[in-house]
Image: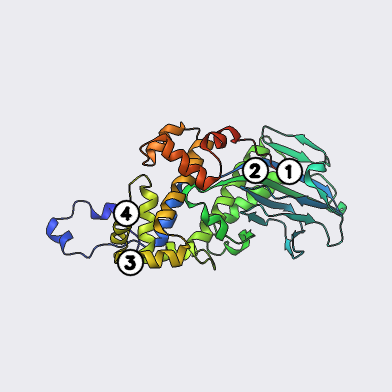
Amino acid sequence: MTYNPQSLINRPDTMSASLPAYVPDVRDLVSELLLGMRLSGVQYRRIQIPRPFGLSFGHVPGRAQFHFVGRGPVLLRDAAGATMTLETGDAILLPRGSMHTLVSDPDAPCRPIGAFESARICDSVASVGTPPPCAKSDPTVGEALIFSACMEFDLGGMQPLVGTMPEFMHVGTLLARYPEIRPMLDAMEREACSERAGFAGILARLADVVASFIVRGWVECGCGDATGWVQALLDPKLGRAIVALHRDPGRNWSVAELAAEAGVSRSVFAERFLAATGMTPVRYVTELRMRLAAQWIARDREAIEAVAYRLGYGSLAAFSRAFKRVVGRPPGAVRADAGQTTPA
């Protein structure tokens, strides 16, 4: 059953009173909380390089990495040495931006991607390698064509979700369920190869959308084998309480009020919450508030005092103490450092 709020409008009171209360699927609520997801590229590279080649990508904390193969095959190798083959038209998202390499063959020597010469195509897109466009090049040369993006991956209060995601999220696992992705991948292949006017900006936007599809598909498919915090979200009782917290993080929540949201006793709620998340409800509320505060201060450039009151703190001093205890730095330092991370 799909919940449609409009279906409850204009019903007679006698009719609606006889209906059972609708309890939304918690997966729908998780998806609702992801409406504020920000997954956008901060640095894009169009890489056209002859074989053999080896490109290494370092880990950049807080950033995801996305690759689309316009001409393959390309081998992706993780830090442990395991490899997977990416064919032409494949896309893959590394939500935690793990260290990895893209190689033409297992024995190819690798160089850091930053060590290759590049030329700016437009504001945020660089070209690595200087061969002619692939549509005009000799197919026997064996060039690879890759479009890569280092991305800001910000889920705000849902940031713990990133830690539960698999290291590699391959678009191929979603095509049967979401066939609408295929035309976007086809469009990326055409744009990457043709170099028509405005191709770099179009590729960048398509990369953002495809990466977002991959994340949403993983959530809608039940978050894979994720356990712990995700399983708490998917628990019909605990999930309702957690969603209530995320909807109103500035409220002065008590454990009893959260237990009422879950529909269980205070003691049962506290015990189940700790077992599922590894922290007490009070600790969870504090960490949620500080994750949101860091986002609003660093990304949205909100005034620190305004953030404090928005999250229910009666004084700036109390907020600053809680922020430093959870984040490890005072809010002013986080604000000062915002935007200084350099992609690999």
Q: Residue at x 62, y 45 (%)?
A: 151
Task: Say whether marks 1 and 2 touch (CB < 8 Å).
Answer: yes
Comparing marks 1 and 4, which lies closer to the viewer? 4
First in sequence: mark 1 or mark 2?
Answer: 1
Closer to us: 261 or 33? 261
Q: Amino acid at mark 2?
A: Leu
Task: Say whether marks 1 and 3 touch (CB < 8 Å).
Answer: no
First in sequence: mark 3 or mark 2?
Answer: 2
Q: Amino acid at mark 4?
A: Ser
Distance Cα–Cα, label 1 vs label 4:
51 Å
| Image coords of residue 148 (percent x, y) | 69, 47
Residue 38 appears anywhere in the view: no
Comparing marks 3 and 2, which lies closer to the viewer? 3
Q: Residue at x 57, y 57 (%)?
A: 163
**Residue bearing mark 2:** 203
| Image coords of residue 56 (percent x, y) | 78, 51
Question: Mark 2 falls on what kind of element?
Answer: helix
Question: Mark 4 falls on what kind of element?
Answer: loop
Question: Mark 1 falls on what kind of element?
Answer: strand
**Residue bearing mark 1:** 46
Extreme residue toward the left, this view: 14
Distance Cα–Cα, label 3 vs label 2:
52 Å
Closer to us: 9 or 161? 161
First in sequence: mark 1 or mark 4?
Answer: 1
**Residue bearing mark 3:** 267
**Residue bearing mark 4:** 254
| Image coords of residue 60 (percent x, y) | 67, 47
Position of residue 177 in the picture relative to residue 68 (left or right): left
Q: Residue at x 43, y 51 (%)?
A: 33
Residue 68, compared with residue 333, is above or below; it is below
Question: Mark 3 falls on what kind of element?
Answer: helix
Q: Amino acid at mark 1?
A: Arg
